[in-house]
Image (cartoon, coloured by chain):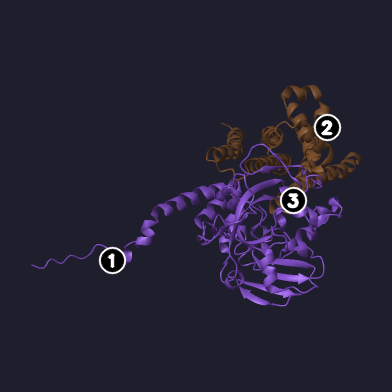
Chain colours: A brown, B purple
Amino acid sequence: MKPIVILKRSLFIAALIPAAMLALCFYQDDLTANPIEFITHFTGDWAIRFLVITLSITPLRRITGWNPIIQLRRMLGLFAFFYATLHFLTWFVLDWFFDFRQMASDIVMRPFITLGMATFLMLLALAVTSTQKSIRRLGRRWTQLHRLIYVATATGLLHFWLARKTVVDQFQVVLVLAILLLGFRVWWTLRKRINAPTSAVS
Amino acid sequence: MLIRHAPDLRFSEITPKSLYLRRREFLQTAAGAAIGAAAVAVASPFAARVAAQQKGQGTAHGAKLANVKKSPLSTTGEKLTPWDDITSYNNFYEYGPYKEDPKEQAWRLKPRPWTIQVDGFVEKKGTFGFEEFTQPYALEERVYRMRCVEAWSMVIPWVGIPLKDIIATYKPTSQAKYVEFVTAFNPAQMPGQSTRLLPWPYVEGLRMDEAMNPLAILAVGLYEETLPNQDGAPIRLVVPWKYGFKGVKSIAKIRFVDYQPKNTWQVMTPNEYGFFANVNPAVDHPRWSQASERRIGNFLRTKTLPFNGYADQVASMYSGMDPKKLY
């Protein structure tokens, strides 16, 4: 078996560990005194972590030059969507129990809910168009569409920031990583632009 | 015939009985530590919880309180929140920003000996030991709803002393318009105080008439036991018609002042938290609705009541004030 296949399969199992832990906590009745809040925070935390992990693949590929690593990107992105979906459903079903009026007014009136909802819809669009068929059909536009992950990361972080009462270490870690990973792309693009004309002249 | 039988074991090798009796605990701890180590890799909150279970001193059940009389001011007809929930889920940033932090970290606190400093516009100033401070009064059980500003709530059987009785003992002068309460400052015992989560020490305050309201108590116990550290040992404020953050914990100073105290959350986020912080379903928190709450233990939300259901006893204190300013 190729190293990338082994890595991909191991990562698939590893990415399911948080969900398994949540299930174990549920089974052991260990979801704190406020299970709905605990599940909300837990799934939200993992959604944002997987977004950042997904963003790290392209820089890792560029830095290491190991191209097969790109095969991990879709799977990791879909795990971000998986945890974001659990997070959304927790809010939709457990927190408000289909109280559509309250949810609708929250989406409109509360910026952190608005941002959370927007982030989820972006991730939904990315997940739906993540198939080989979509890549072929959308062509160049697929690349453009999937740049939405940068926006989704930013809105996701802002959503996280606004939901907290004070600065927590965990947010700072995720924020710093996200800035580094997005910064890498800016640097990479600028470098290409600067290099491109000179190579064209020569 | 003398048979020399050298003992196989030196005395020093014999496991002390106390340790032997705790062998299961040790195994659990070891297993816990192994699981904990694995969990660190994925999610640190889990490991922290395992570590906390190894300690637990000061955060588990306390001493039984004697001669606690039931109070007619108790809330009736509500199911009490279980002891485990009250003592494992709360905000107490002195121990960290997460709800499980107080239970995990509060074993560090030494609630005795404890002193309370009484200062400001008051006749009987001084620093008083906890026993001297609480001894003159009969303890009362007060069952109150507790509504957190984060929209969850509990029903808690506090044991405490009416604040008005304590205030009467120290005789504030006519210049005293407000009472300011300050939490102990001791970063070695309260690790959150070494961070910049909040400006320390935690300060809260009441207007004089609010402090004299019969519902206001200083609590020293819970379920007829001494207060566990994570719930604000040895003494804390309970004002059930206000959001939970008004209930300043582990009180070290009480000052009678002529200005409206700058309470910590108001200093921290003035557009979200005010001084009065009366429970008000009509005034939303800027980031979420205050119209309903989740009672711990219930799945569906319950409607939040004005003044947390204590309007009959407290609303008259605020007549003529703009209710929008009472958040």
The residue indicated by pointer 1 is B10
The residue indicated by pointer 2 is A144
The chain identifier of the residue carrying mark 1 reads B
Q: Distance between the residues labelled 2 and 1?
A: 76 Å
Q: Do labels 3 and 2 share a chain?
A: no
- Side (left or right) of B219 relative to B182: left
- Number of the label disc, if any, that sits on residue B312: 3
Question: Picture coordinates of residue A137 (x, y %)?
Answer: 79, 21
Amino acid type shown at disc 3: Asp
- From what the image shows, is residue B306 above or below residue B58? above
Residue drawn at point x = 72 percent, y = 61 percent: B196
Q: Residue furthest right?
A: A201
Q: Which residue lies furthest to the left in this view?
A: B1
Q: Which of B110 and A184 is in front in this view?
A: B110
- Side (left or right) of B207 relative to B6: right
Amino acid type shown at disc 1: Arg
The chain identifier of the residue carrying mark 3 reads B
Q: Nearer the viewer, residue A5 or B60?
A: B60
- Side (left or right) of B188 relative to B17: right
Disc nearest the viewer among 2 and 1: 1
